[in-house]
Image (tube, coloured by chain):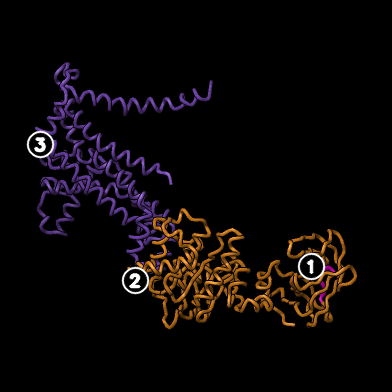
Amino acid sequence: MAEIKLNNLTKRWGDFVGVDDQSLHIKDREFLVLLGPSGCGKTTTMRMIAGLEDPTAGEIWIGDRMVNDDLPKDRDVAMVFQNYGLYPHMTIFENIAYPLRVRGVDKSEVKPRVEKAAEQVELTQFLDRKPKALSGGQRQRVALARAIVRTPKVFLMDEPLSNLDAKLRVTMRAELKHLSRELQITTVYVTHDQIEAMTLADRVAVMKHGVIQQLGTPDEIYNDPANLFVAGFIGSPAMNLINGSVRNGMFVTTGGTQLVKLDAADRAKAILGVRADDMQVHDAGQGDIDVTIYAFENTGESTLLTVQWGKQRVIARGDRHLRKDQDEVVGISLDPDHLYLFDPETEDRIRI
Amino acid sequence: MRDNTLKYLLVLPAVVVVFATAIWPLIEAARLSFTVGRLNRPGSLEQYLGWENYTWAFLEEPAFWNSVWVTAVYTILTVGLTTIMALGLALLLAPGGRLRSSAQTLLILPFAMSPALIGVSFRFMFNPEFGLFDAFFGVLIPPLADVSWLADPNLAFAVVVMADVWGWIPFLTLVLIGGLASVPRDTVEAAQVDGASGWRVFRDITLPQLGPVLAVVIILKSIFSLKTFDQVFMLTNGGPGTATQTLSHYIYFNGMKYGQIGYSAAVAWLMVIPMIFLTYAYAKFVFRKN
């Protein structure tokens, strides 16, 4: 068990910057998620921690040891790969046992430990099979078992659920969470799926273009986004971002006249952010403003109303019993405590 | 015309060609191997002799056993050396290996040369008067300074092996690079993180997954080594004495030089037997289902 420190870590390939001078302190036993779109440097960061990629500059510390020059095998980490990385020519038992075998664990100890790991991921009846004979979800469990069979200082997981179908992903997510709480080992988890990040993480680091945009608990990332990118990336549906300006304590949409009370200084250009859940849907005339429904969607657990607001469309979430139809007019009100204002030039948050 | 008829009509030319160039000569050679078959004796090509050509080779002809021995040692040495060196080069040249693609292009050159040309150029290079290798080895290893490479039985054999290994490495390297590229990177990286050293990653992960390709390489090279003729013919002509006389060369010598067509057809058929096994194994690996 150990903490991880990244000091001014940089990875460049020629002119391309993968990770740009990033520092990150991952606490002991913490579950940290690196979240971002593809190409944002999250996987590169993880691979540098694993030792599969050499940093161009900066330091990597695992525990009280700088591991920059250590081979992957000497870093005492375990990794779960996106495509599982199972050894196709070995049985499941041999796959799980491999980390023990190469580390010279006593033979009499291997079997019970493999069986225990297999039990933890509910794989015991498949130990004699080859990976080929297993389903995607089962292969994923093998990869997990191989990681937990010894007690490494650090777990690294590279989009471990992305190859599973949607339903299995939800189940495995819960199992992963359960397992990680049980094992209490420092974990770095890479994903582009914000739900995985929200549900699994102690803290999330949102990355873009090799730079960490925001580091915080899922609550902080969701409720207090540091900039436009984080605001737009987290949440489903994504936060509504409305172009406009601030005049006399009111937000005026571009090309529209609709006004929302906003306690902020005047500025010619601003972006208002509001989540679908922070908008209430009323009958026409009863909200702050009246809007026309562009599309009405019933997802079962709630309803989504895409409404035409000036020249822009925004999405509001309604009660699951709400029934409306296209082109109807509804009233919308915004929760004044959950409005976000951004500078369109710098994309930074303007605190109100 | 029915599709069925057309189907057979379309493969007919290929079948005819294969029959005329491979099947028919095989049958005809089998027939000849049971005749007296002397080129200088009219009618002897039809003169039935029974198994005598075969028993002669097995029981009364030390030169036959010599060429079997030469061919066996030659095959084991060339297959072994070529495969190991090609594997080493492939590991260096593979994507993620330590050398890049410009070197790959350069390395294919020896394979572009015909075996006969390789034989000739190696004969020049080991010429005691002006040979490059002759001078080179003489400087590096002083005891070898005055030897005449192609006149010494063991050294001549070594030269033939060297020429063959040199000529074959590039092609097998390319095949193995392809094989290495098909080993999933994930599995190699997983093993590295699991704690395996470079050597153990190679032994436990890369090599087993490379197995089928390696088998194809070994079988293919064995087939070509067994039937080696041109290099031997150009480089040593089987000599000195019969030190480098491979089976192919022995067959050629008896058939073409001494006119003993019947006997050499019998020996040729003896060579067909291991070839059939190798070809069967090769086909099994190449056309194997996953």
Q: Chain B hue?
A: purple
**What residue is disc 1 on?**
A319
Residue range (magenta): A251-256
Amino acid type, residue under disc 1 in the picture: Asp
| Label 1: how many Cα within 10 Å (few below 14, some 14–19, many 20+) | few
How far apart in space, not on screen, are marks 3 and 2 (Cα)?
Answer: 57 Å
Q: Which chain is orange?
A: A
**What residue is disc 2 on?**
A105
Q: Can see residue A314?
A: no
- Image x and y of residue B277, in percent: 28, 38
The residue positioned 34% from the left and 46% from the top of the image is: B216
Confirm whether circles 1 and 2 share one chain. yes
Task: Between residue B16 and residue B121, name the one nearer to us.
Answer: B16
Position of residue A263 relative to residue B166, above or below, is below
The picture quadrant where one finds residue B56 is top left
Task: Indicate the secondary structure of the residue bearing disc 3.
Answer: helix
**What residue is disc 3 on?**
B62
Task: Indicate the secondary structure of the residue bearing disc 1.
Answer: loop
- Please identify, in this view, whether the residue under mark 3 or under mark 2 is nearer the observer: 2
Amino acid type, residue under disc 3 in the picture: Pro
Task: Indicate the secondary structure of the residue bearing disc 2.
Answer: loop
The residue positioned 80% from the left and 64% from the top of the image is: A321
Q: Is A149 displayed left or right of B58 in the figure?
A: right
- Image x and y of residue A109, in percent: 35, 70
How far apart in space, not on screen, are marks 3 and 1 (Cα)?
Answer: 99 Å
- The verdict on residue A151 being magenta is no
The residue positioned 73% from the left and 77% from the top of the image is: A340
Disc 1 to disc 2: CB gap under 8 Å = no
Task: Between residue B128 and residue B73, name the one nearer to us.
Answer: B73
Of the residues under marks 1 and 2, which one precedes in the sequence?
Answer: 2
- The verdict on residue A254 being magenta is yes
Q: Which residue is at the far top? A: B43
